[in-house]
Amino acid sequence: MRYLIAANWKMNKTVSESIDYVEKFREMVKDVEGIDIMIAPSFTALASVSPLLEKTSINLGAQNMFYIERGAYTGEISPIMLNELNVKYVIIGHSERRHIFGEKDDLINKKILAAVEYGLRPILCVGETLEERELGKTMNVVERQIKLGVAGLEREIGLIDIAYEPVWAIGTGVNATVEQAQEVHLFIRNLINDISKGNDSDTRILYGGSVNEKNAGELIKAKNVEGFLVGTASLDPHKFYKIILETLEV
Ligand code: PGA
Protein backbone atom coordinates (compact mmCIF):
# COMPACT_ATOMS: atom_id res chain seq x y z
CA MET A 1 0.00 0.00 0.00
CA ARG A 2 1.31 3.46 -0.95
CA TYR A 3 0.75 6.07 1.72
CA LEU A 4 -1.16 9.21 0.74
CA ILE A 5 -0.12 12.66 1.93
CA ALA A 6 -2.86 15.12 1.07
CA ALA A 7 -3.06 18.91 1.35
CA ASN A 8 -6.38 20.58 2.07
CA TRP A 9 -5.90 24.28 1.47
CA LYS A 10 -9.49 25.10 2.46
CA MET A 11 -10.52 28.69 1.58
CA ASN A 12 -6.95 29.90 1.17
CA LYS A 13 -4.81 31.05 -1.78
CA THR A 14 -5.91 33.01 -4.81
CA VAL A 15 -5.14 31.71 -8.30
CA SER A 16 -1.79 33.49 -8.47
CA GLU A 17 -0.83 32.32 -4.97
CA SER A 18 -1.75 28.76 -5.91
CA ILE A 19 0.37 28.88 -9.07
CA ASP A 20 3.28 30.29 -7.12
CA TYR A 21 3.06 27.48 -4.53
CA VAL A 22 2.83 24.71 -7.12
CA GLU A 23 5.76 26.01 -9.14
CA LYS A 24 7.94 25.84 -6.02
CA PHE A 25 6.52 22.63 -4.61
CA ARG A 26 6.79 20.52 -7.76
CA GLU A 27 10.53 21.22 -7.85
CA MET A 28 10.87 20.10 -4.22
CA VAL A 29 9.12 16.76 -4.76
CA LYS A 30 10.43 15.91 -8.21
CA ASP A 31 12.55 13.01 -6.93
CA VAL A 32 10.05 11.74 -4.37
CA GLU A 33 8.93 8.19 -5.12
CA GLY A 34 6.83 5.50 -3.52
CA ILE A 35 4.20 7.74 -2.03
CA ASP A 36 1.03 9.44 -3.30
CA ILE A 37 0.81 13.22 -2.99
CA MET A 38 -2.35 15.26 -3.45
CA ILE A 39 -3.13 18.94 -3.20
CA ALA A 40 -6.65 20.34 -3.04
CA PRO A 41 -6.73 24.05 -3.96
CA SER A 42 -9.93 26.06 -4.08
CA PHE A 43 -12.25 25.51 -7.06
CA THR A 44 -11.22 28.77 -8.68
CA ALA A 45 -7.58 27.64 -8.86
CA LEU A 46 -8.10 24.09 -10.18
CA ALA A 47 -8.00 25.01 -13.88
CA SER A 48 -4.75 26.97 -13.51
CA VAL A 49 -3.02 24.44 -11.30
CA SER A 50 -4.02 21.36 -13.30
CA PRO A 51 -1.64 21.86 -16.29
CA LEU A 52 1.23 22.61 -13.89
CA LEU A 53 0.88 19.12 -12.41
CA GLU A 54 1.17 17.29 -15.73
CA LYS A 55 4.24 15.05 -15.80
CA THR A 56 4.66 15.43 -12.02
CA SER A 57 3.83 12.91 -9.31
CA ILE A 58 1.41 15.33 -7.64
CA ASN A 59 -2.30 14.55 -7.91
CA LEU A 60 -5.00 17.16 -8.01
CA GLY A 61 -7.87 17.07 -5.52
CA ALA A 62 -11.07 19.02 -4.96
CA GLN A 63 -12.40 19.98 -1.54
CA ASN A 64 -16.03 19.12 -2.22
CA MET A 65 -18.48 18.47 -5.06
CA PHE A 66 -22.17 17.99 -5.73
CA TYR A 67 -23.52 14.58 -6.78
CA ILE A 68 -25.44 15.51 -9.93
CA GLU A 69 -23.92 15.96 -13.38
CA ARG A 70 -25.59 19.25 -14.34
CA GLY A 71 -28.67 21.34 -13.66
CA ALA A 72 -30.25 24.06 -11.56
CA TYR A 73 -28.01 23.86 -8.48
CA THR A 74 -26.72 27.40 -8.08
CA GLY A 75 -23.22 27.58 -6.68
CA GLU A 76 -22.44 23.85 -6.94
CA ILE A 77 -19.67 22.02 -8.82
CA SER A 78 -20.36 18.74 -10.61
CA PRO A 79 -18.22 15.64 -11.03
CA ILE A 80 -17.86 16.12 -14.80
CA MET A 81 -16.45 19.61 -14.20
CA LEU A 82 -13.79 18.01 -12.02
CA ASN A 83 -13.16 15.22 -14.54
CA GLU A 84 -12.34 17.73 -17.26
CA LEU A 85 -9.65 19.30 -15.05
CA ASN A 86 -7.95 15.96 -14.34
CA VAL A 87 -8.98 16.03 -10.72
CA LYS A 88 -8.29 12.62 -9.20
CA TYR A 89 -9.34 12.93 -5.55
CA VAL A 90 -12.25 14.65 -3.87
CA ILE A 91 -12.58 15.36 -0.14
CA ILE A 92 -16.11 14.51 1.01
CA GLY A 93 -17.77 15.14 4.36
CA HIS A 94 -15.06 17.29 5.86
CA SER A 95 -16.05 18.36 9.38
CA GLU A 96 -16.31 21.98 8.22
CA ARG A 97 -18.84 20.89 5.60
CA ARG A 98 -20.71 18.91 8.25
CA HIS A 99 -20.66 21.52 11.02
CA ILE A 100 -20.62 24.89 9.22
CA PHE A 101 -22.66 23.96 6.13
CA GLY A 102 -24.91 21.35 7.72
CA GLU A 103 -24.04 18.37 5.51
CA LYS A 104 -25.63 15.18 6.77
CA ASP A 105 -24.61 11.57 6.28
CA ASP A 106 -27.16 10.89 3.53
CA LEU A 107 -25.92 13.81 1.39
CA ILE A 108 -22.34 12.73 2.02
CA ASN A 109 -23.25 9.21 0.91
CA LYS A 110 -24.71 10.52 -2.38
CA LYS A 111 -21.49 12.44 -3.01
CA ILE A 112 -19.33 9.41 -2.25
CA LEU A 113 -21.33 7.23 -4.67
CA ALA A 114 -21.24 9.92 -7.39
CA ALA A 115 -17.50 10.45 -7.00
CA VAL A 116 -16.84 6.75 -7.53
CA GLU A 117 -19.27 6.61 -10.46
CA TYR A 118 -17.36 9.41 -12.18
CA GLY A 119 -13.95 7.87 -11.57
CA LEU A 120 -12.88 10.18 -8.76
CA ARG A 121 -11.34 8.80 -5.58
CA PRO A 122 -13.20 10.17 -2.57
CA ILE A 123 -11.58 10.79 0.79
CA LEU A 124 -14.39 10.34 3.30
CA CYS A 125 -13.73 12.43 6.44
CA VAL A 126 -15.02 11.23 9.78
CA GLY A 127 -14.39 12.22 13.37
CA GLU A 128 -15.93 13.06 16.72
CA THR A 129 -16.35 16.41 18.47
CA LEU A 130 -14.74 17.05 21.84
CA GLU A 131 -18.10 16.61 23.53
CA GLU A 132 -18.66 13.26 21.83
CA ARG A 133 -15.18 12.09 22.87
CA GLU A 134 -15.77 13.13 26.47
CA LEU A 135 -19.06 11.25 26.48
CA GLY A 136 -17.24 8.13 25.27
CA LYS A 137 -19.05 8.17 21.92
CA THR A 138 -16.05 8.37 19.57
CA MET A 139 -16.39 4.87 18.10
CA ASN A 140 -20.18 5.17 17.76
CA VAL A 141 -19.85 8.42 15.81
CA VAL A 142 -17.09 7.10 13.55
CA GLU A 143 -18.99 3.88 12.93
CA ARG A 144 -22.18 5.73 12.01
CA GLN A 145 -20.38 8.18 9.70
CA ILE A 146 -18.59 5.36 7.88
CA LYS A 147 -21.52 2.97 7.58
CA LEU A 148 -23.88 5.67 6.29
CA GLY A 149 -21.16 7.31 4.19
CA VAL A 150 -20.29 4.16 2.24
CA ALA A 151 -23.79 2.67 2.03
CA GLY A 152 -24.15 0.91 -1.32
CA LEU A 153 -20.40 0.66 -1.77
CA GLU A 154 -19.61 -1.89 0.91
CA ARG A 155 -17.91 -4.41 -1.37
CA GLU A 156 -15.97 -1.73 -3.26
CA ILE A 157 -14.67 0.14 -0.28
CA GLY A 158 -11.17 -0.11 -1.78
CA LEU A 159 -12.19 2.66 -4.19
CA ILE A 160 -12.19 5.21 -1.39
CA ASP A 161 -9.82 6.47 1.28
CA ILE A 162 -10.93 7.49 4.77
CA ALA A 163 -9.56 10.36 6.86
CA TYR A 164 -9.98 10.19 10.62
CA GLU A 165 -10.08 13.82 11.70
CA PRO A 166 -11.15 14.41 15.29
CA VAL A 167 -12.98 17.75 15.20
CA TRP A 168 -11.20 18.96 18.35
CA ALA A 169 -7.83 18.51 16.62
CA ILE A 170 -8.62 20.39 13.40
CA GLY A 171 -6.91 23.76 13.18
CA THR A 172 -6.39 23.85 16.96
CA GLY A 173 -2.71 22.95 17.25
CA VAL A 174 -3.77 20.01 19.46
CA ASN A 175 -3.16 16.79 17.52
CA ALA A 176 -4.40 13.38 18.61
CA THR A 177 -1.73 11.39 20.43
CA VAL A 178 -0.28 8.33 18.74
CA GLU A 179 -2.33 6.17 21.13
CA GLN A 180 -5.58 8.02 20.36
CA ALA A 181 -4.98 7.83 16.61
CA GLN A 182 -3.99 4.17 16.76
CA GLU A 183 -7.07 3.22 18.72
CA VAL A 184 -9.50 4.80 16.26
CA HIS A 185 -7.55 3.73 13.16
CA LEU A 186 -7.60 0.11 14.34
CA PHE A 187 -11.33 0.40 14.96
CA ILE A 188 -11.84 1.79 11.43
CA ARG A 189 -9.67 -0.89 9.82
CA ASN A 190 -11.63 -3.67 11.55
CA LEU A 191 -14.93 -2.02 10.68
CA ILE A 192 -14.20 -1.61 6.97
CA ASN A 193 -12.67 -5.08 6.77
CA ASP A 194 -15.87 -6.43 8.22
CA ILE A 195 -18.34 -4.46 6.09
CA SER A 196 -16.38 -5.05 2.86
CA LYS A 197 -15.86 -8.76 3.62
CA GLY A 198 -12.12 -8.26 3.33
CA ASN A 199 -12.08 -6.00 0.26
CA ASP A 200 -10.55 -3.06 2.12
CA SER A 201 -6.84 -3.49 1.39
CA ASP A 202 -6.69 -0.53 -1.04
CA THR A 203 -8.34 1.87 1.41
CA ARG A 204 -5.89 4.10 3.19
CA ILE A 205 -6.84 5.45 6.60
CA LEU A 206 -5.38 8.94 6.87
CA TYR A 207 -5.03 10.94 10.04
CA GLY A 208 -5.88 14.65 10.01
CA GLY A 209 -5.92 17.33 12.69
CA SER A 210 -2.99 19.65 13.41
CA VAL A 211 -0.46 17.49 11.58
CA ASN A 212 2.76 19.45 11.13
CA GLU A 213 6.40 18.91 10.26
CA LYS A 214 7.20 18.28 13.94
CA ASN A 215 4.62 15.63 14.83
CA ALA A 216 4.33 13.87 11.44
CA GLY A 217 7.31 11.58 12.04
CA GLU A 218 5.80 10.18 15.20
CA LEU A 219 2.20 9.96 13.96
CA ILE A 220 3.09 8.16 10.74
CA LYS A 221 4.65 5.34 12.76
CA ALA A 222 1.31 4.69 14.46
CA LYS A 223 -0.22 1.41 13.36
CA ASN A 224 -2.90 1.74 10.66
CA VAL A 225 -2.01 5.37 9.97
CA GLU A 226 -1.46 5.28 6.22
CA GLY A 227 -1.08 8.94 5.42
CA PHE A 228 -2.25 12.40 6.38
CA LEU A 229 -4.78 15.04 5.44
CA VAL A 230 -3.03 18.29 6.27
CA GLY A 231 -4.64 21.72 6.54
CA THR A 232 -2.70 24.60 8.09
CA ALA A 233 0.80 23.14 7.65
CA SER A 234 0.13 22.37 3.98
CA LEU A 235 -0.22 26.08 3.18
CA ASP A 236 3.55 26.44 3.35
CA PRO A 237 5.26 24.32 0.65
CA HIS A 238 8.39 23.89 2.79
CA LYS A 239 6.40 22.56 5.75
CA PHE A 240 4.32 20.28 3.56
CA TYR A 241 7.47 18.94 1.90
CA LYS A 242 8.98 18.23 5.35
CA ILE A 243 5.88 16.22 6.29
CA ILE A 244 6.39 14.18 3.11
CA LEU A 245 10.03 13.58 4.00
CA GLU A 246 9.05 12.37 7.49
CA THR A 247 6.66 9.91 5.89
CA LEU A 248 9.28 8.59 3.50
CA GLU A 249 11.48 7.60 6.42
CA VAL A 250 8.99 5.02 7.67
P1 PGA B 1 -5.42 21.26 10.16
O1 PGA B 1 -6.65 20.82 9.21
O2 PGA B 1 -4.21 20.51 9.66
O3 PGA B 1 -5.30 22.72 10.02
O4 PGA B 1 -5.79 20.82 11.55
C1 PGA B 1 -6.81 19.49 8.83
C2 PGA B 1 -8.06 19.31 8.01
O5 PGA B 1 -9.07 19.97 8.32
O6 PGA B 1 -8.08 18.54 7.04
Image (spheres, rainbow, N blue to C red):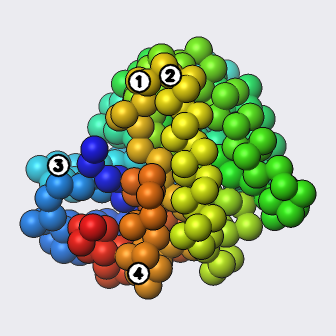
Q: Is 54 situated above or below 12?
A: above
Q: Is 192 situated above or below 60?
A: above
Q: Is 111 situated above or below 242?
A: above
Q: Amino acid at mark 2?
A: Ser
The residue under label 4 is 213
Query: As drawn, is 175 to the left or to the right of 32?
Result: right
The image quadrant that residue 70 belongs to is: top right
Residue situated furthest bottom in the rendering: 214
The residue mark sitting in front, 2 or 4, is 2
The residue under label 1 is 199
- State the image coordinates of residue 242 (x, y, percent, origin top left): 31, 79
Task: Report how far apart the C-alphas of labels 1 and 4 lie in the structure.
Answer: 33 Å
Whether residue 217 is visible to the viewer of this picture, yes or no, is yes
Tell me the residue at 86%/63% (across/down). 134
Do the residues bearing badges 2 and 1 touch, measured as CB atoms within 8 Å? Answer: yes
Label 1 residue SS: loop
The residue under label 3 is 54
- State the image coordinates of residue 182 (x, y, percent, origin top left): 55, 59
